[in-house]
Amino acid sequence: MQLVPELQSALKRPGASVPARVAVVNEDLWVSALPISGVGVVNSFFYDPPLRFWRDLDPEGKLEPIYNRYQFMQIKLEPAMAGADFQISSPRMDAVTLAVQPQRFDFAKVKADFVLANLQDADLLKGNAHLQIEKTDGVNWTLFRVMSDAK
């Protein structure tokens, strides 16, 4: 499986010693397919929960009973979220959802270099000061770069 050339070239980071890490928003198929094509995905299927990832979001471990499990981890946009920038929930025993407020959430918190979204979700993310549009195919996807000053 190979990426479309436009996306493949956009994910290259000149001079970087480690591959780019992508946070995929609301697209479970992309979360599964991108790792097969060699792309590092922040949210995906895990045989062991990535506890370091969660510690960065929940340093005091208050929500550990929610995310301390084998899991499929998904990122969903929650525009109506009041107050907090994110919420962690578990819709079923084998899944954990990180719901993020699209205009405020800093994707550097999840160590992402890029955010990949469908066009509808991209419209919600365009107002996020931590993101800059890198590339879009204008039909299916938009790739945002996580601003380096936010990391």
Image (cartoon, rainbow, N blue to C red):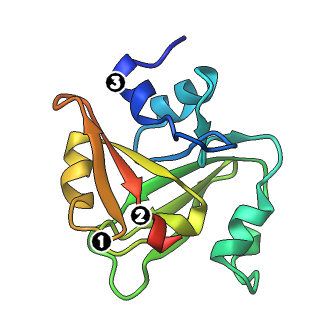
Mark 2 or 1: the one toward you: 2
Q: Which residue is mark 3?
A: 6
Residue at the spot 70% in from the left edge and 67% down from the top edge:
54
Say whether marks 1 and 3 touch (CB < 8 Å). no
- SS for tag 3? helix
Image quadrant where residue 132 sits: bottom left
Rounded to the nearest angstrom, the CA distance separating label 2 from label 3 is 20 Å
Residue 93: x and y in percent read: 69, 51
Q: Residue at x 58, y 20 (%)?
A: 37
Measure how far apart labels 2 and 1 are at the Cα level: 8 Å
Inspect the image, locate mark 3, and give the three-letter code of the amino acid beneath it.
Answer: Glu
Q: Position of residue 151 (x, y in %)?
A: 54, 70
Q: Which residue is mark 1?
A: 129
Q: Quadrant of the N terminus?
A: top right
The answer to whether mark 2 and mark 3 are in CB contact below 8 A is: no
Between the C-alphas of marks 1 and 3, the distance is 24 Å
First reached walking from the N terminus: tag 1 or tag 3: 3
Q: Which residue is mark 2?
A: 147
User: What is the crowding at mark 3: few (fewer than 14 residues within 10 Å), some, or many (at least 20)?
Assistant: few
The vertical placement of 76 against 107, above or below, is above
Which picture quadrant has residue 99? bottom left
- Please determine whether, in this image, residue 55 is positioned above or below residue 52: below
| Category of crowding for the residue at label 2, using alpha-carbon neighbours closer than 10 angstroms: few (below 14), some (14–19), many (at least 20) | some
Residue type at tag 2: Met
Sooner in the amino-acid sequence: mark 2 or mark 1: 1
Q: Nearer the viewer, residue 78 or 13?
A: 13
As drawn, the label of residue 118 is none
Mark 2 or mark 3, which has the lower sequence index?
3
Q: Tell me where residue 133 appears, x and y as whole percent.
A: 27, 50
SS under mark 1:
loop
Instruction: Please state the horizontal and vertical placement of residue 113, each as a whole percent of the image.
Output: 51, 52
Do the CB atoms of the residues marked 2 and 1 lie less than 8 Å apart? yes
